[in-house]
Image: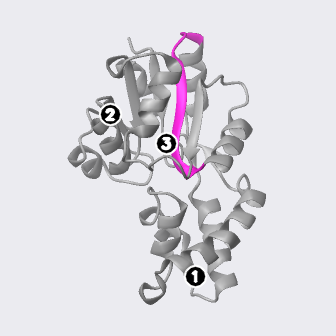
Amino acid sequence: MKKLVIFDLDGTLLDTIADLAMAANHALTVCGYPLHDVSEYPRFVGNGINKLLERALPAEARCEAEVMRMREAFVAYYDAHNTMLTRPYEGIESLLGTLQDRGVMLAVASNKYHSATLHIVAHYFPTIRFVAILGQRDDVPRKPHPAIVYEILDIAGVTAEETLYVGDSDVDMNTATSAGVEAAGVTWGFRSEDNLREAGACHIAHHAHELLQWI
């Protein structure tokens, strides 16, 4: 039995793509660039907000100055609207409740900026007692660097062998592998099963309750 489960946020616990797309399109409008259809955004996400905005920009505008100009508009909009269309994936609330009742420690490790990560997790999962909720911070390398996982293991006081990492992308699988943690990929998020397997997933879950067999 695992003592700790670390979850990615976007694409794993919550379907956030519509709110992310709305915020990015708002930033594109403010900065005078063409918009994208919501269906295009899943391929932009996974490496943090700056990378999302870089990918959303036209190729000729992808420079640090434009990304930062976009980020200012994005964050102002997203902070005010990040719970408009976002929803937990089917079975996630029940899964978290079951794990909590069993005494399994729970944590969130996200490449979403830290303040938004804290707000969204508190909003959608108010009854879940996470041992750590960590988003992207300037002084910590983004996933797939394993620093965020090491930090959570230290907070929880458990070993890598006692931990399962759950995510929906190659970034997540690479993060878990780099940290020496068993990785479970979920297919309801933003990447395909093939992508997850190629990135080193130890397990593949098609429904939330399937994760219980590896915990």
Q: Are marks 2 and 3 in contact (CB under 8 Å)?
A: no
State the residue at coordinates (39%, 22%): 163
Q: Secondary structure at mark 2?
A: helix
Residue 54 higher or lower than 193, as above or below: below
Query: Which amino acid does the dot numbered 3 rest on?
Result: Thr
Residue 77 in which image quadrant: bottom right
Whole-percent x and y of residue 44? 45, 66
Residue of label 3: 12
Q: Main secondary structure of the magenta part?
A: strand
Describe residue 205's horizontal placement relative to residue 11 as left or right: left
Q: Is residue 36 visible?
A: no
Whole-percent x and y of residue 187? 38, 45
Mark 3 Cα-neighbour bin, 10 Å: few <14, some 14–19, many ≥20: many
State the residue at coordinates (65%, 76%): 27
Residue of label 1: 35
Residue 188 higher or lower than 151, as above or below: below
Mark 1 Cα-neighbour bin, 10 Å: few <14, some 14–19, many ≥20: some
Residue 202 in which image quadrant: top left
- For residue 109: magenta? yes
Measure the C-alpha gap from mark 1 to mark 2: 37 Å
State the residue at coordinates (57%, 44%): 135
- Quadrant location of the C terminus? top left
Q: Nearer the viewer, residue 159 or 196?
A: 159
What residue span does the magenta drawing correspond to?
A: 101-113
- Quadrant location of the N terminus? top left
Q: Which mark is residue 179?
A: 2
Describe residue 171's horizontal placement relative to residue 134 as left or right: left
Q: Secondary structure at mark 3?
A: loop
